[in-house]
Image (cartoon, rainbow, N blue to C red):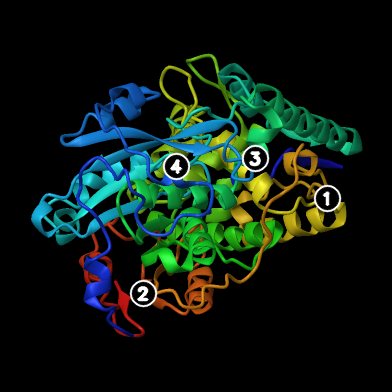
C-alpha cells in the first residue's frame, strides 16, 4: 500500500457602561499593587511592573524587525512561573508589544489579542493591527497589546525540535510511501521528533508539560493585572478563540469583553476538527475555482467540473518527482499542497496561487514554494519561526493523543473525501503522528466551556472560512451564550483584516461600548 507521510497542511444586550469603563488603572508601566483578584501565592507575579522599551531586541527575524519598527510601538517582558503548581520555582518570560491609546484621557484599558496558530506571534499581530486601529475609537480608547504565548517567538525560552536544515529536509522528504514498512518509518520519525522536542527545549519535559492553553490563560490573567486592568478585554482569532473561551471558563469574574473570530468548536476532538477543517478547505477551493475559471489565464482551465482533476494532474507527479528549485531545494507534493492551502486563507493570495500553478505546469516551482514558505514561516535566510514547532507541541499537550489506527485511517479517508483536491490518489494512512509519542500527558479535553455569569460574548464566523468552518462559530456562540455575527466571505477571519466596514463597526462598538449587533446580523 502506498500513502503520504502526513495529512495535507494542517485552524442582544448592552453591557453596563460603568462596568466597561471603570476597570483599569492608568496606562503607566503597570501596578505595584495587583489589579483585580489574585490567586493565592501569585502576588509577586500579579503586581510586577512592566518595563516598556525599544522593540528591536525582541525581533527574531527580518520580518519581525520590520514590523516591530512601527511608530509608537514598545515592548516588554512579563515574568510568569514555568509551572503554576510551583510558583516559587523556575520562571520564564512572555514577550509583549504595545501600541498606546491615542486618547489617554478617555482610555478604557488594554485590548489583549492572540492571532491563533496555535503558536502564532501576538506581538507581530499587534504590530500589524496597530495601523488598522489608527483613527478608530478602538485605537483611541485602548492600548493594543499582543503577546507571544509561552515557548513562542520572543518569549523565553522557546520550544525547539528541529534545526532549520532538518526542517528543510523533512519538507523535501514528504513524498510517496510504499507499504507497511513506510508507515513504520513514518511513526519512527514521529517518535524521534517528539524525543528531539524534549531534548532540545530548555527545561525539557517540564516545559512541554506546561506549554498548553491551560497555562497560557494563566499567563494572560497575570498580564491583565500587570497591565492594570481589573477585567480583561480580549480579541482572539482562530486558535485564539480557544484561549478566549478557556480564559472565560478559568477566570469568569475577570472578563469584560471577548471578541472571538474564526472559532474552534470546543467539543470537537482532534480528528473531528481535522475533518471539519477539510470541509472548509474543500469549500474554499471550490470558491477559488469559481473565481479562476472566469479568467482567461486560469491555470486549471475554463471548466469548473474538471478543475480538481486539472489540479491533481499538476501536483500528483511531485509525489515521485519533486521539482528542483534554483536555491537547491525541491518542491515536494506536500509543499505544493501546503502552498495551495496557505493561499486559500485569503482571497488576496488567489492570483498568486493561480500564477504559481501556471508556472508549475511549466516545470517551475518557485512561486508554489514561496507560498508554502509563508505557511511554514521560513525567511529568505532559511530560518524558521517557532510557529510550526509550537503548533505541534501545543496541540499535543492540549488534546488526548489519537492512537487507534482504524480511526486515523477512517478520518484521513473522510478528510480527502471532503477536500478532494488534496487527494494524492493513494490509500489513506494509518500512521500515528508525533502526539501519539509525546513525552508528557495532555492537560485539556474537548468539552463545552462552563462560562456561566460572563458578560455577553461576540463571535464572528465567516461562511466560507477555509480553516475554521462557519458552523464552529455557530456552535461556539451558542455554547458561550453569546451573539453570532456572520460574515459572508471566503477567507480565514474577518474583523480588522478584510476592510469590511460592517464587521469592523460591529466589533468596535462591542469592544468599546459593549453593544452587541442585532440578532442575525450578516455582513457581506
Marking on residue 252: none
- Identify the residue at image location x=19%, y=59%: 138
Quadrant containing the N terminus is top right
The percent position of residue 87, horizontal first and vertical second, equals: 57, 40
- Secondary structure of residue under mark 3: helix
- Residue that numbered label 2 is attached to: 485
Which is more N-terminal, label 4 or label 2?
Answer: 4
Dots 3, 1 in contact, CB < 8 A: no
- Residue that numbered label 3 is attached to: 316
Cα gap from disc 3 to disc 4, whole angstroms: 53 Å
The percent position of residue 317, horizontal first and vertical second, equals: 65, 35
- Identify the residue at image location x=48%, y=15%: 327
- Identify the residue at image location x=68%, y=51%: 443
Few, some or many residues within 10 Å of mark 1 (<14, 14–19, 20+): some
Cα gap from disc 1 to disc 4, whole angstroms: 39 Å
Taking depth in this image into account, of 30 and 186 the one nearest to the observer is 30
Cα gap from disc 2 to disc 4, whole angstroms: 37 Å
Taking depth in this image into account, of 104 and 237 the one nearest to the observer is 104
- Residue that numbered label 4 is attached to: 45
Q: Nearer the viewer, mark 2 or mark 4?
A: 4
Which is more N-terminal, label 3 or label 2?
Answer: 3
Which is more N-terminal, label 4 or label 1?
Answer: 4
Dots 2, 4 in contact, CB < 8 A: no
- Residue that numbered label 1 is attached to: 403
Q: Nearer the viewer, mark 3 or mark 4?
A: 4
Q: Nearer the viewer, mark 2 or mark 3?
A: 2
The percent position of residue 406, horizontal first and vertical second, equals: 86, 56
Amino acid at each position: 500500500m502506498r500513502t503520504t507521510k502526513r495529512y495535507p497542511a494542517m485552524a442582544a444586550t448592552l453591557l453596563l457602561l460603568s462596568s466597561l469603563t471603570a476597570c483599569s488603572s492608568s496606562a503607566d508601566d503597570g501596578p505595584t499593587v495587583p489589579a483585580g483578584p489574585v490567586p493565592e501565592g501569585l502576588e509577586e507575579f500579579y503586581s510586577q511592573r512592566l518595563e516598556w522599551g525599544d522593540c528591536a531586541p525582541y525581533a527574531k527575524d527580518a520580518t519581525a524587525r520590520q514590523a516591530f519598527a512601527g511608530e509608537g510601538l514598545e515592548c516588554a517582558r512579563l515574568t510568569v512561573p514555568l509551572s503554576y503548581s510551583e510558583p516559587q520555582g523556575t520562571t520564564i518570560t512572555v514577550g509583549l508589544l504595545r501600541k498606546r491609546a491615542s486618547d489617554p484621557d478617555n482610555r478604557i484599558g488594554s485590548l489583549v489579542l492572540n492571532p491563533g496558530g496555535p503558536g502564532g506571534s501576538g506581538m507581530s499581530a499587534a504590530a500589524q493591527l496597530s495601523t488598522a486601529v489608527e483613527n478608530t475609537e478602538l485605537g483611541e480608547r485602548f492600548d493594543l497589546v499582543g503577546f507571544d504565548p509561552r515557548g513562542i517567538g520572543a518569549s523565553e525560552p522557546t520550544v525547539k525540535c528541529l534545526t532549520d536544515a532538518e526542517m528543510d529536509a523533512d519538507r523535501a522528504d514528504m513524498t510517496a510511501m510504499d507499504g507497511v514498512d513506510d508507515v513504520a518509518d513514518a511513526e519512527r520519525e514521529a517518535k524521534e521528533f517528539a524525543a528531539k522536542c524534549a531534548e532540545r527545549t530548555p527545561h525539557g519535559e517540564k516545559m512541554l508539560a506546561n506549554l498548553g492553553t491551560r497555562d497560557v490563560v494563566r499567563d494572560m490573567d497575570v498580564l491583565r493585572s500587570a497591565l492594570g486592568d481589573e477585567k480583561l478585554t480580549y480579541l482572539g482569532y482562530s486558535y485564539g478563540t480557544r484561549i478566549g473561551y478557556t480564559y472565560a471558563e478559568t477566570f469568569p469574574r475577570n472578563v469584560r469583553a471577548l471578541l472571538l473570530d474564526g472559532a474552534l468548536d470546543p467539543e470537537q476532538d482532534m480528528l473531528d476538527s481535522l475533518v471539519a477543517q477539510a470541509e472548509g478547505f474543500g469549500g474554499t477551493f471550490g470558491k477559488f475555482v469559481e473565481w479562476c475559471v472566469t479568467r482567461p489565464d486560469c491555470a486549471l482551465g475554463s471548466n469548473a467540473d474538471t478543475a480538481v482533476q486539472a489540479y491533481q494532474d499538476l501536483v500528483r507527479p511531485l509525489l515521485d518527482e519533486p521539482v528542483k528549485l534554483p536555491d537547491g531545494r525541491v518542491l515536494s507534493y506536500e509543499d505544493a499542497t501546503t502552498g495551495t492551502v496557505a493561499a486559500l486563507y485569503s482571497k488576496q493570495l488567489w492570483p498568486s496561487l493561480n500564477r504559481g500553478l501556471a508556472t508549475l505546469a511549466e516545470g517551475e516551482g518557485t512561486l508554489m514554494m514561496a507560498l508554502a514558505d509563508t505557511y511554514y514561516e521560513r525567511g529568505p535566510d532559511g530560518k524558521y519561526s517557532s510557529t510550526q514547532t509550537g503548533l505541534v507541541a501545543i496541540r499535543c499537550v492540549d488534546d488526548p493523543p489519537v492512537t487507534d489506527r482504524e480511526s486515523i485511517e477512517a478520518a484521513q479517508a473522510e478528510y480527502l473525501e471532503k477536500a478532494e483536491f488534496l487527494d494524492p490518489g493513494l490509500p489513506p494512512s494509518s500512521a500515528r503522528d508525533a502526539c501519539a509519542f509525546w513525552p508528557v500527558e495532555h492537560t485539556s479535553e474537548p468539552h463545552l466551556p462552563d462560562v456561566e455569569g460572563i458578560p455577553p460574548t461576540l463571535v464572528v464566523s465567516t461562511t466560507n472560512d477555509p480553516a475554521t468552518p462557519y458552523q464552529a462559530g455557530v456552535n461556539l456562540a451558542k455554547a458561550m451564550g453569546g451573539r453570532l455575527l456572520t460574515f459572508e466571505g471566503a477567507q480565514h477571519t474577518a474583523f480588522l483584516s478584510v476592510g469590511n466596514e460592517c464587521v469592523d463597526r460591529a466589533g468596535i462598538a462591542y469592544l468599546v461600548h459593549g453593544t452587541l449587533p442585532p440578532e442575525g446580523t450578516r455582513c457581506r
